[in-house]
Image (cartoon, coloured by chain):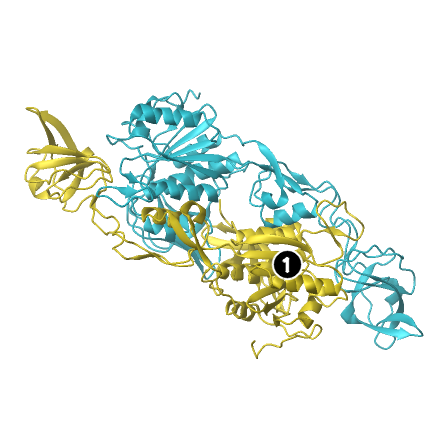
Chain colours: A yellow, B cyan
Amino acid sequence: MDAAIDRNMNKYHRKAMTVEAARELLQSRVRPVEPTEVELAEAIGRRLAAPIRTVEPIPHFRRSGMDGYAIRTADIAHASAALPIELEIIEHIPCGKEPLYSITEGKAARIMTGGMVPDGADAVIMQEMTEAVEHNGRSIVRIQKKIAPGLNITPIGEEAGEGTLVIEAGEKLGAGHTAILAALGYNRVPVYRKPKVAVLSTGTELLRLTDPLQMGKIRNSNAYMLMAQIIAAGAQPLLVGQIPDDYPKAERMLYDLLASDADLIVTSGGVSVGDYDSMADFFLRWEGTTLFNKIAMRPGSPTTAGAWKDKLLFGLSGNPSACFVGFELFVRPVIQQLQGAVVDTAKTVTCLLAADYEKVNAYTRYVRGQWYSSGGNHYAKPVGRDKSSTILSLKDANCLIVIPPTKTGIVSGEIVQIIPLDGALIV
Amino acid sequence: MDAAIDRNMNKYHRKAMTVEAARELLQSRVRPVEPTEVELAEAIGRRLAAPIRTVEPIPHFRRSGMDGYAIRTADIAHASAALPIELEIIEHIPCGKEPLYSITEGKAARIMTGGMVPDGADAVIMQEMTEAVEHNGRSIVRIQKKIAPGLNITPIGEEAGEGTLVIEAGEKLGAGHTAILAALGYNRVPVYRKPKVAVLSTGTELLRLTDPLQMGKIRNSNAYMLMAQIIAAGAQPLLVGQIPDDYPKAERMLYDLLASDADLIVTSGGVSVGDYDSMADFFLRWEGTTLFNKIAMRPGSPTTAGAWKDKLLFGLSGNPSACFVGFELFVRPVIQQLQGAVVDTAKTVTCLLAADYEKVNAYTRYVRGQWYSSGGNHYAKPVGRDKSSTILSLKDANCLIVIPPTKTGIVSGEIVQIIPLDGALIV
């Protein structure tokens, strides 16, 4: 338990932590889940649990880069249009075939792109620069121009030597990684298993999806939003449901989950200072360590997190936008780290603000925004109403714009940091 | 069948089509697959098959934006520190509870953030601006300052009125969309089914994943790379395997697939003018319409596509980078359109080229690149060796840099278009 952290932070007199400090504190707490091994096709999109090295050099044979003829450049050193050189074609080498013969003086082999260059040859001359003729029953290639040694031949190991590190552990397997793993013969791949993330909601105002609306009540949208965010982060969401109003029951449910095989627990709602904030009460009384219960940001300042043994419990705000932002800033990196990712929380993307932002605040604001490019510059502008209870504008945002604390607002054209959201700018 | 299109294009004398014309031609041919209906949790990441409108206004009741007291602003119009106004607290209104009473002169109700504002009240004063006291057994709130009418109350329908279009058909369901669908009570969601995309490879040089390397042969990496790209585009890959060397068998296999329930067929390899290019031969002789067999681009100029009845068949190049680029430019938009997406192929992202690009070409080049931001500008620089047979650098690319035809190369600092790849810039 960290001596520096108040074990049970006061519900009313909270000390705000910066976003950066909170992210670092979380990062220091997370260990990856166990590795497992899956078929290559299933590994797509997962994170690698071990570094991948080449076993053989790539390529492992001299490879032709053209359809043409494997030749000795010395043989055609004096070729010209007036005095073309004729070489005897001794073999056809398609892709996949090991050549039968070496190329000796006056000989050539027809070869396809990707084919194995025979010994003796030191270049491949492209088909379009040659003329094939039959001559007394012999196949001949006629060449009018010399070429440089090595031309159109990829040497052994040009891409990578034997034992080269080609993919680091923790990397997410995209199309390029998948191609490499296939080329290296990985039919089974070491990846981290998908972390299980339990999702709960608090609030007597929440109706189930199938319930008709009632006065004063709303349907539970945060739990489904969090599911989508958890899936996008590469984990498996477990929709647990509602935290009971009854405190002893709520407490039992949370301890049961903390002791379950869920790797992470995320709740929404009940973290502020209202009379009915069950999560705030739980974090006040529980046997775990509350890491923070106030963040110097808007929306989502009452965002809370704690550790119970090795497990993290997040209490996100119940306001949809605050819940969304709290997830993106704090929960997403934890889920990535649980899968072995090396998360650089200092990595940023810069844009020019495309509209004046007039709202002032003592805290950093994370504003839903649209990010676009024009003339080599990248711009970001706020979308929708900047109210934390607004859910409609969430779907229009492809980034969060980071508005630092300011007493005067920020004018159009100033540089701002943004946090791109999933799928941002993908055409 | 389009009269404008040569039915069987010549294998050797191909006419190059621009990337833009080829994309438009494909776009005009694609119709979405059938819609289906799935549980909301399963709909995440899929594309909507029908527009979504609100049934009730959002919010459907006057909602408090603060923890505090619902009051009549008229009652506190003359409140001051010297002469605070006292109001009787007649009710506690947590979230989810319909108020029992209206607020009349001299009365107030304690209310939580998200709670339903009672009739008669025209503002909510935040808790921190008040003092609650007990007075002769009555609960009293003491207020020292007037506030404006409407403060901290979200009016009915502020986010959206009844019957407002909130999500268009064809949109991909991210976290924000999922939240909206949950709030509107969609436990089942109309989405397009996942298109089935058959993947085949040609080439006698290809080993299976589990085969040991042999001289002249390589393992089949394109098929797995394409699977990853197909999954990222939202479709379901079907790994069919190898197209037989024997032409009649290859032809039968392709016709069987064209008649199968696969929505799209993608092959890699065998499209150039080599002696063993089975796909080029198939496109020459088949009963479908070849839409193009040469694209004015590098890599991947022999990229070929054709239509057989309503089904598209792609012959991508066998070189890994050319195969990758061919998929991103031509197959990805088709897969998106099969799921109802409105694809804007003219949408671009601009960057500044971060390094001189000296290679000249008569055709547009799509160069694997890394895209990053610095000081409000966005830069892109080529990664790895720009050879189409290179697979290692594919994993390091987060964009394709579009290098237009040029006789002099392009210097650092010039504006270029890029095509972001999946996950680009996502921290």
Q: Residue at x 49, y 44 (%)?
A: A427
Secondary structure type for disc 1: helix
Q: Which residue is mark 1?
A: A323
Q: How many numbered discs, if any?
A: 1
Task: Give left or right: position of B217 versus A205.
Answer: left
- At which x and y percent is residue A19? 57, 68
Q: Which amino acid type is marked by label 1?
A: Cys
Q: Residue at x 72, y 65 (%)?
A: A278
Task: Give left or right: position of B84 versus B310.
Answer: right
Up-down: is A143 above or below A308?
A: above
- At which x and y percent is residue A204? 76, 57
Give the chain letter at badge 1. Answer: A
Q: Residue at x 64, y 72 (%)?
A: A287
For this orientation, the residue located farthest to the right is: B136
Task: Give left or right: position of B133 versus B11.
Answer: right
The answer, for residue B12, to whether it is visible in the render is yes
Which image quarter: residue B252? top left
Q: Residue at x 52, y 37 (%)?
A: B194
Foreground pick, A6 / A426: A6
- At which x and y percent is residue A83? 6, 34
The answer, for residue A370, to whether it is visible in the render is no
Task: Give left or right: position of B241 versus A291.
Answer: left
- At which x and y percent is residue A324? 61, 57
Foreground pick, B18 / A399: A399
Q: Quick one: label 1, few (<14), some, or many (20+) residues within 10 Å? A: many
Foreground pick, B198 / B283: B198
